[in-house]
Amino acid sequence: MNTQTAHSKTLTCPCGSGQPYGDCCGHYLDHSESAATAEQLMRSRYTAYTQQREYYLLATWHPDTRPASLELSGQTAQQWIGLTIKRHEQTAADQAIVEFVARYKINGRAYRLHEISSFVRKDGVWLYVNGEILRN
């Protein structure tokens, strides 16, 4: 095991699971494994945002709704500070929703994104379709 792999095994995953990154979202972001559930995909996508991994975000987005680019590097620096999964519901064999709250800061000011995301499983792989932002 190299030093970087050992280090990723000890860092707590940003997704809030409490597990080491290497045992959690690292499987998907660093090793190209497919998430077994929509919730796992949601968590890994949140982690990808914390790391500005645009390629992963686009690769896990359904082609019918995927934007050409997210332009993450050109955005004001967001400091992602937490993810709470409120609900994960399998609505059909290959469809699911995940309700979550993601907290972040921009220039020291706190924000929260409360969304119900829709996912589909296509050819055995979960993909993000779209989300409904909830206003609190």
Image: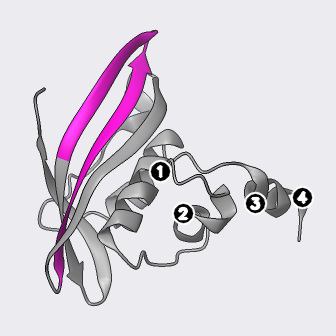
Q: Earlier in the sequence, mark 4 or mark 2?
A: 4
Q: What is the C-alpha distance between the residues marked 1 and 3?
A: 17 Å
Q: Which residue lies furthest to the top in this view?
A: 108
Q: Earlier in the sequence, mark 2 or mark 3?
A: 3
Please state, as top left, top right, bottom left or bottom right, where the C terminus lies in the image: top left
Residue 81, relative to residue 63: is it above or below?
A: above
Q: Do the residues labelled 2 and 3 touch (CB within 8 Å)?
A: no
Tell me the amino acid under the disc marked 4.
Thr
Q: Does the magenta stretch include residue 17?
A: no
Would you call the spot at circle 1 few (<14 residues within 10 Å), some (14-19), or many (20 or more)? many
Please give the name of the residue rendered at 41% of the width and 66% of the height, measured from the top-left corner.
40
Residue 91 position within the rendered picture, expressed as x and y whole percent measured from the top left:
11, 74
Q: Write the start and end of the magenta stretch as one range.
A: 94-115
The residue labelled by disc 3 is 9
Q: Which residue lies furthest to the front in this view?
A: 86
Residue 81 position within the rendered picture, expressed as x and y whole percent measured from the top left:
49, 30
